[in-house]
Image (cartoon, rainbow, N blue to C red):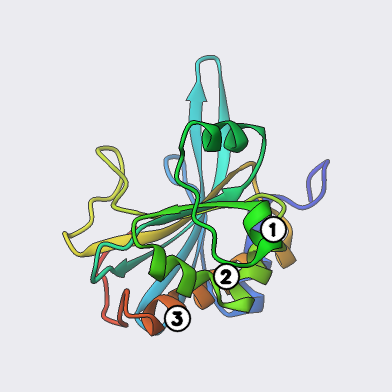
Amino acid sequence: MGLFGPGKDEVWEEFSNEIKAKFISGGLLKSSKVEFNIDNWTITLDTYAVSNGKTSTTYTRIRAPFVNKNNFKFKIYRAGIFSEIGKCFGMQDINIGYKDFDEEFIIKGNKQNKIIELFSNDRIRSLIKSQPKILLEIKDDEGVFGVYFPKDVDELYFSVPGVIKDINMLKGLFDLFEVVLNELNDIGVTDKCKANVEL
């Protein structure tokens, strides 16, 4: 127990025990992480730091590699001042037909019909709205300094600044990943084949 309550590892280990996941303690060069398996998908929770010169910012991220059968991509985040400016300059924003959700979130992507199918899932919209901060997307891979994925493999990716130590928030995010992955399977974007990627 630290000065400001329990530390990240303590909370994450408790979280992993509650959801029957695997907690992997970190070391000098790697952060601790939680791994949770659903069918052939593995959802991984960890942190990473980005240097800003003299200081650095720590981010919480959740990732799940999957076989992407038709190169489907999307990104969703909360609307704000900068997103309104982006709209004025023609930034793509896909409306899914749920007025309150469309006003609250910006959705970008490459297959509008699949995006509408995905976000028509009531549970997905509810879980997204329950998160105070959200950036959820499908990424190709992690670039030169990250993990390289095979040609047909992408990852469902969430990232926010700070360290999430709220167990209910973490449960909501893992629920979101599980529901999104299953919905991607249902709408034909993926299947339950193993991605064969180690994060």
Front position in the image: 138 or 57: 138
Which residue is labeled 1 in the image? 131
Residue at (64, 46) in percent of width and height: 163
Image coords of residue 111 (percent x, y): 35, 62
* Amino acid carrying mark 3 in the image: Asn
Answer with mark 2 or mark 1, whichever residue precedes in sequence. Answer: 1
Which residue is labeled 3 in the image? 182
Residue at (32, 74) in percent of width and height: 189
Residues at discs 2 and 1 in contact (Cβ within 8 Å): yes
Kindly identify which numbered label has been placed on residue 2. none
Which residue is labeled 2 in the image? 176
Answer with mark 3 or mark 2, whichever residue precedes in sequence. Answer: 2
Say what secondary structure mark 3 lies in: helix
Residue at (72, 63) in percent of width and height: 130
Asked if residue 191 is positioned above or below residue 131 in the image, the reply reads below
Asked if residue 118 is positioned above or below residue 165 in the image, the reply reads below
Report crowding for label 2: few under 14, some 14 to 19, many 20 or more residues within 10 A (C-alpha). some
